[in-house]
Amino acid sequence: MNLNTDFNEKQIEILLVAESLFADNGFEGTSIRTIAKEAKINIAMVSYYFGSKEKLLQALASYRLKDLRFEIENLATEDLDPREKMKRLISLYINRFNCNKGIYRILHFELAGGKSNIKLEILDDIRLKNFNALKRIIEEGQAKSIFKKDVTIELITPTILGTFFHVYMNKIYFQNLLQLEKESDFEHYIENTLTAHIHQTIKGLLNYEN
């Protein structure tokens, strides 16, 4: 299957079912049979569209992450102040993480955490391209004496991602700690307080004003 092609309606339906099952039960704990049952299709159709469970996961990663890659690459080339680019980049990351928690939980806590032997080449490709776009933004800021020179660029994205997922994975704790009784209260906290904190953290690491 060519992962660069658009997915049809039935493929997307299968991908969304698989995403939910992978997130709830783990990749290893989810079978093609279970996916087919939940999607109300036969196993042969899953195999026809994706070939295997591993290729289905590759397709899911492509479906969920390719738009983010394009947006980050486009942001890096926009005619904007590097500080504004970083602000938009952080907001873009957090928005995507928050809207697509399932796939990021699968990729960054199960696969990347070493719980599976599955290696997703597409994930490595997307990560590298996202890193190169981030590197371009930071180096532009350094060339203009906006950002400091001794920035550990490879740890910027993990700082953003790690902070977000620490709060997300400890949701009940933070809801109790901060008395966020409604789901909307927690979402508001992420969109405002957490996002502002991450902005300030990255700003401090890059050491720029305004």
Image (cartoon, helix red, strand yellow):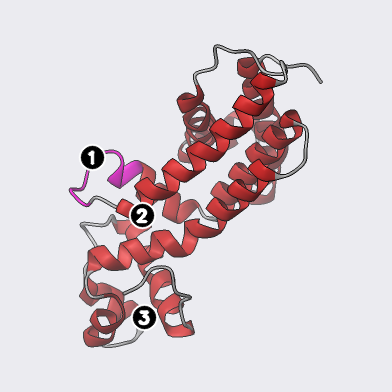
Q: Return the residue at label 2.
A: 122
Q: Residue at x 54, y 31 (%)?
A: 135
C-beta proximity under 8 Å, tags 2 and 1: no
Q: Which residues are magenta?
A: 109-118
User: Up-down: is 141 above or below 35?
Assistant: above
Q: Position of residue 38 (x, y in %)?
A: 34, 78
Front label number (2 vs 1): 2
Residue type marked 3: Ala
Q: Residues within 10 Å of mark 3 (few under 14, many from 20)?
A: some
C-beta proximity under 8 Å, tags 3 and 2: no
* Marked residue nearer the N-terminal end (3 or 2): 3
Numbered circle sitting on residue 114: 1
Q: Residues within 10 Å of mark 2 (few under 14, many from 20)?
A: some
Residue type marked 1: Gly
Numbered circle sitting on residue 183: none
Report whether residue 35 is seen: yes
- On the rendered structure, is 197 left or right of 127? right
User: Up-down: is 113 above or below 46?
Assistant: above
- On the rendered structure, is 109 left or right of 143? left
Q: CA distance from mark 3 to mark 2?
A: 25 Å
Q: Return the residue at label 3.
A: 39
